[in-house]
Amino acid sequence: MDPENVEEMLIFLRDRNKTDSLESLLDKPFEPKPQLASKPSRFSDGTIRVFYSALEPETAEAEVFVWYVKYALNNASEERTAHYRRFVCNFQGDVKDLRPHLAAMPCLIQDEAAGYPDCNRIGIEAVSEGLDGLLTPSARKRKGTCLPIFRREALSNPQSQDFVAFKFDPSSGKISILAG
């Protein structure tokens, strides 16, 4: 997409939002995806469905930013823009707070290769104990809190906030937030 078309895309996404179900944003992480290979994530070995969220908007944006850089913008040879929808929702369920245990569990904020295997085991244990989610320190935002959620039933009342566009300029290597 050309940089000039960013505003046009944001208008399209806002208009589309009028008919799209916000509930589907809560459903998507829990739906089977037979056409896609299950990939491990921080708290899933690929067999557990997880809705990744954060308590603070800044933490959510820092987490999303890293994933967009890694998967949507990295290694691009031309300017590229990635868009996502920001929304909030309610959570009600049983959680275990892992934040006080960071010193004993550095995997909670380590990069993928180092931290994922241990965090995968934590996710599997949480699900087997019937937990709905975990309170964890953010790997991307100092003093931020993430809330990986394991049960769709624990989520409700999604409310759209706005759209964000990240623009990557390969000549400078800079990424800027165009809207938000």
Image (cartoon, helix red, strand yellow):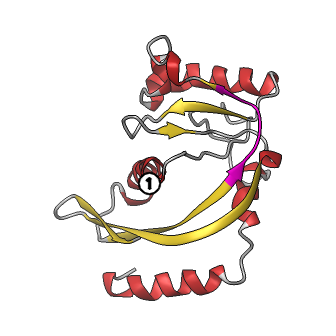
| Residue 43 visible, this orientation | no
- Which type of secondary structure does the marked residue at label 1 adopt? helix
Location of residue 125 in the rendering, given as x and y in whole percent from the top left corner: 73, 20
Q: Residue furthest top?
A: 104
Left or right placement of residue 77 versus residue 37 in this view:
left
Location of residue 41 in the rendering, given as x and y in whole percent from the top left corner: 58, 37
Task: Give amino acid for label 1.
Answer: Glu
Location of residue 139 in the rendering, given as x and y in whole percent from the top left corner: 43, 34
The quadrant of the image that shows the N terminus is bottom left
The residue under label 1 is: 61
Residue pictured at 47% horizontal, 31% vertical? 112
Q: Quadrant of residue 98?
A: top right
Q: Residue furthest left?
A: 172
Residue pictured at 52% horizontal, 16% vertical? 101
Out of 138 and 49, give the one closest to the viewer: 138
| Residue 93 visible, this orientation | yes
Left or right placement of residue 138 versus residue 77 in this view:
right
Span highlighted in magenta in the image: 90-96
